[in-house]
């Protein structure tokens, strides 16, 4: 098995490598002491800095691996359970409450930051410069890759798709066909809510309603007929995220992006293949600071 070498000290990528490598070694069935020795032998950090980061990775990686396995089991069970149905009465109650005052233009006006580009917004969403998957197309994948956010900035505005949650590896896992997969996806930061039901104005009203209960960070027009709302779920448990997805589905949300951390969604400020810009309608970076 070939392992990714540790980046040079001072590159800003050693800590990420340490956690990613610990996660992958535990996933491969390595015992804790063997993982620890491998990290000590191959890290480019030295002294107390290396020790702290390695022990932190040893502590955290098994928990994330356990969550990944639990998510996989839940995914299997979901095929046997009924997904929540749209609740017309709940949808109507939200739309009546908005009294037609909440629409796409209201969403634009309520945005703390306005007229943002892809280059503007990606560093706001990912201030720690993590690995992010993006692509021009998903079926089939074209120009798809996993790179640091800073590496995407020059070209991201030309792309259609992004996986909203950071990745922990650039490799294609054994048995997979894409870098974008559950085993490569790190802790969840965002749930993206989108819908093909109703008008854009109705979707804006529902997103702002949901934003009263969970922090709304971003709203992106798909370039076609839907609006994607990014909500902050950093630090939330899988069960909490599942409950949010169920509630959003009752209000017309698509189940796939709501439930799947690695699901591809529209690139903020990117360009749809119909030529339209995927407009950033709303951006509130302060909502990312809200913690449970």
Image (cartoon, helix red, strand yellow):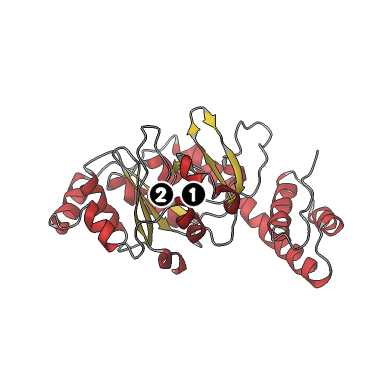
**Count of residue discs:** 2
Contact between labelled residues 1 and 2, with CB atoms less than 8 Å apart: yes
- Residue beneath the point at 34% across and 45% down: 194
> Which quadrant is home to the N terminus?
top right
Residue 16 appears in the figure:
yes
Compute the Cα span from label 2 to label 1: 8 Å
Observer-nearest residue: 255 or 105?
105
In the image: residue 46, left or right of residue 253 = right
Seen from this angle, which residue lies furthest top? 140
Q: Where is residue 132? Give x, y as percent.
A: 57, 48
Q: What residue does disc 1 label?
A: 164
Q: Where is residue 101? Give x, y as percent.
A: 15, 58
- Residue beneath the point at 22% across and 58% down: 106
Decide: is 20 above or below 262.
below
- The tag earlier along the polypeptide, 2 or 1, is 1
Determine whether the residue tagged by mark 2 lies in a helix, strand or loop: strand
Decide: is 285 above or below 159.
below
Q: Where is residue 275? Give x, y as percent.
A: 37, 35
- Residue beneath the point at 45% across and 34% down: 79
Q: Quadrant of residue 51?
A: bottom right
> Which quadrant is home to the C terminus?
bottom left
Q: What residue does disc 2 label?
A: 192
**Dot 1, crowdedness within 10 Å: few (<14), some or many (≥20)?**
many
Q: Where is residue 197? Give x, y as percent.
A: 25, 39
């Amino acid at each position: 098995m070939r392992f990714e070498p540790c980046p040079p000290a001072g590159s800003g990528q050693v800590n990420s490598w340490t956690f990613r490598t610990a996660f992958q070694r535990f996933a491969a069935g390595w015992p804790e002491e063997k993982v620890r020795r491998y990290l000590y032998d191959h890290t480019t950090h030295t002294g107390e800095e290396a020790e702290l980061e390695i022990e932190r990775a040893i502590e955290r990686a098994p928990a994330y691996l356990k969550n990944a396995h639990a998510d996989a089991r839940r995914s299997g069970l979901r095929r046997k359970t009924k997904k929540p149905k749209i609740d017309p009465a709940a949808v109507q109650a939200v739309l009546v409450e908005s009294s037609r005052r909440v629409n796409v233009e209201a969403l634009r006006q309520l945005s703390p930051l306005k007229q943002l580009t892809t280059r503007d917004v990606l560093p706001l969403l990912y201030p720690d410069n993590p690995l992010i998957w993006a692509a021009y197309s998903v079926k089939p994948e074209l120009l798809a890759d996993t790179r640091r956010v800073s590496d995407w900035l020059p070209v991201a505005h030309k792309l259609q798709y992004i996986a909203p949650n950071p990745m922990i590896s650039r490799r294609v896992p054994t048995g997979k066909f894409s870098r974008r997969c559950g085993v490569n996806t790190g802790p969840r930061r965002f749930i993206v809510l989108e819908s093909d039901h109703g008008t854009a104005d109705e979707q804006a009203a529902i997103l702002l309603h949901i934003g009263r209960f969970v922090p709304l960070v971003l709203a992106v027009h798909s370039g076609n007929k839907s609006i994607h709302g990014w909500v902050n779920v950093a630090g939330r448990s899988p069960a909490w995220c599942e409950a949010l997805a169920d509630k959003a589905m009752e209000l017309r949300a698509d189940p796939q992006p709501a439930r799947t951390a690695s699901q591809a969604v529209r690139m903020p400020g990117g360009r749809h293949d119909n030529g339209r810009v995927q407009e950033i309608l709303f951006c509130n970076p302060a909502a990312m600071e809200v913690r449970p």
